[in-house]
Image: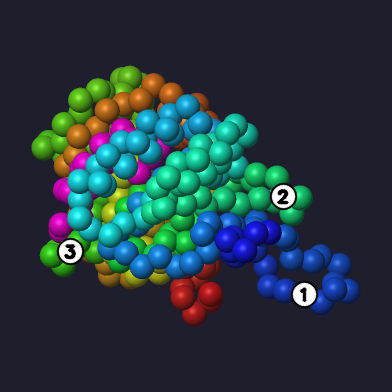
Amino acid sequence: MSSGEITSQIAGPNSAPDVPASAPNPAPVLPRVRAVPSRVVKCYLSILVPAYNEEKRLPATLDAIADYLKKRDFSHELLVVDDGSRDNTREVVREFAATHPWARLVSYDDENGKPLNRGKGYAIRAGVEAAGGRDILFSDADLSTPIEDMERLLPPISRGDCDIAIASRALPESNLAIHQPIHRELMGRTFNKIVQALAVPGVQDTQCGFKAFRGDVAKRLFALAQIEGFGFDPEILFLASKYGYRTREIPVTWRHCDNSRVNPVTAPLSMLRELLEIRWNDARGLYDEDQK
């Protein structure tokens, strides 16, 4: 490992305490998480972009973020978190970071050094752990919500109006420039009703991939999180409510991208299972800080 890399372990729901070497069931080996460079960057804003097999879309996304940031005078960093891509996603990020020193790659491998796919929730958690910003914002790699809309999410946090600001497609003020296919919209509305019933009452859109946090709040909540898949959004908002943080939904511009990573057949079942898992985790005390 080069001197410019750090490794750390992020506990997941299957992690276990250390046991003696003679024990019959040793603790599972956790992924090695790398963030390059290793120095802690203190800045106003950390932008996180989770990526899985994004070598084609990522260059345009990184350029768009760079073009926006060079017009702003606040300190910033960009962390692209590779979630076990099988294509050249990591090389795309490394090439971009070579000419943009405020950008860096976060990645994780298995015990054999091969890229490991753990899920979007795990990717965001790894990015939050590596982030050094006073505030933290994450965005999907397709920029369905344009990066400029951070100007809608960040001011309420800076003013102290809320601790978490989330983009919401459900608000009447939002501009849905390109709609999803009707079956996806119906799926999303149905899923949100279930989310509100089981985990996050009153939040109209938990799944839009554009959210901003006070940095300390993000680090606290994601350190408690257990869900590694797409159900991480309602889990984080559930934890925010549990610990008394204020969440505000913000209208944004949103454009549907055809090559979504969400499988319309399997995703609803997985998300339902993860919603039930949130309630079960809470009942077992897994979200209590004294259990960490």
* Residue 212 located within the stretch drawn in magenta: no
Distance (Cα) linking label 3 and label 1: 45 Å
- For the residue pair 55 and 83, the one nearer the viewer reads as 55
Choose top left, top right, bottom left or bottom right for residue 90: top right
**Residue 49 on image: x %, y %:** 41, 45
- Image side of residue 146 versus residue 28, left or right: left
The kind of secondary structure element at disc 3 is: helix
Res. 213 image quadrant: bottom left
Local packing at callout 1 (Cα closer than 10 Å; few below 14, some 14-19, many 20+) is few
Residue 84 appearing in the image = yes
Q: Which mark is residue 19?
A: 1
Instruction: Give the residue drawn at x 17%, y 63%.
Output: 158
Label placed on residue 113? 2
The residue segment tinted magenta is: 139-156
Mark 1 to mark 2 CA distance (whole Å)? 24 Å
Residue for point 61% across, 52% down: 108
Closer to the eye: label 2 or 3: 2
Residue indicated by mark 3: 158
* Category of crowding for the residue at label 2, using alpha-carbon neighbours closer than 10 angstroms: few (below 14), some (14–19), many (at least 20): few
Colour setup of the view: rainbow
